[in-house]
Amino acid sequence: MLSSIKETWVWNKEGGFGTSVPKEGENPIKTLNGYSIDRKYFSFVTNKFIPYEEPNRVDFALLAPGHIEYQKIGDEVNFFDDSGELFWKKPINSYPRSGYFSSPVLYLSGDNNTVFLLDSSGNRVGLGELNGRFLTDFDFDHTGKGAVVLFSGGEIYKVDEKGNSIYSLDLSSDRKDSFFKSLSISPNGSYVVVHFSTSKKDSFLILDEKGEVAEEWETEHYFPHKVYLSIADNGNVLLNLPTALEFYENGKLSWAVKKDKTGSVYQSVFAIANGFVYSIEKEIVFLNAEGKKIRTKTLASTESPIRFFPGKDKYTFYLETKRDLYQLRIF
């Protein structure tokens, strides 16, 4: 059960300073890699801002050291270690996505039909590449044990931290004329929930750790784009749709709340140990794994957009807003 959730640390991203390190739980200064703001990358190891100018862009693992510099249209990738020194340079013309622990780093091809699997040294690992009919979504294991990749044609791959296959499936083989759009992995890595559409109706399915379908259901709504969703360790699913919140238990709608006004496509939602956290307008809402509200937190509208991501400790997670970083801990 979630007894309480407390803010234990906050950091001002613009100024590069924060409150004192919490006495209990993980040390955010030693856990977090860095962040980007106003075309600058901040490293917690060096305590310095590193500017990057167009056409250069930066990508980095949130919980592992170093950062990658690349170009939107380019043929070279540079990796800098945690001290800011150039560690390697390679002729790569794909876009890096490092996730939480950079294990593995996903490199997306320009046509979105191939995802290359590389380690933090820029070497191919495991399967080497994943192929499908247009990449639509991917998610990283919260504990650094790999990633899940989904293509619109129904090809889905779950790989471990070394790029080796845990399972690979073609979900379209039993679901003809379907378009696969969104996915999310549970905090313990056991479940993956997949969103797809058939005949202008949204459907969802849950895969267990072996890649077998545990639940599958159809809804009455239809969104022609990715939706934001999360799945708990017990298999319950929370959808943060532009028009409503929907909570599912055992593949059945448990409750739904319509929103007063339609939001943008991006609606943040995240599964934490024994529960969920999501944003709605100016509020951050915390639920337990059964969908019961624990508490809320109010944020100024100027803090949007926001996102959540895990810490290394199971009971610690982070909220990143436009200007601040918060550490939150489950007690």
Image (tube, rainbow, N blue to C red):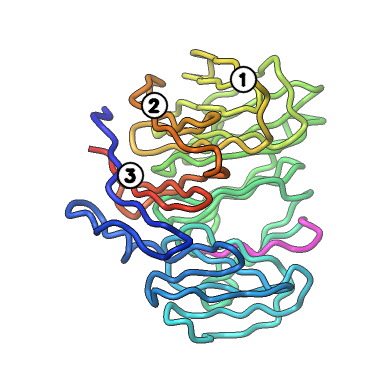
Residue 57 position within the rendered picture, expressed as x and y whole percent measured from the top left: 66, 69
Give amino acid for label 2. Leu
Give amino acid for label 3. Leu
Compared to 254, does 212 lie above or below? Answer: below
User: Was residue 318 drawn as part of the magenta stretch in this picture?
Assistant: no
Q: Which mark is residue 299?
A: none
Which residue shows up at 47% across the image and 19% down it? 249
- Residue tagged by mark 2? 287
Q: Nearer the viewer, mark 3 or mark 1?
A: 3
Residue 67 position within the rendered picture, expressed as x and y whole percent measured from the top left: 52, 72
Q: Secondary structure at mark 1?
A: strand
Q: Which residues are magenta?
A: 104-112
Question: How far is disc 3 from disc 1 in space, using C-alphas?
Answer: 33 Å
Compare residues 93 and 234 and report the one nearer the observer.
Answer: 93
Q: Nearer the viewer, mark 3 or mark 2?
A: 3
Q: Which of pointers 3 and 2 lies earlier in the amino acid sequence? A: 2
Q: Is residue 8 left or right of residue 241?
A: left
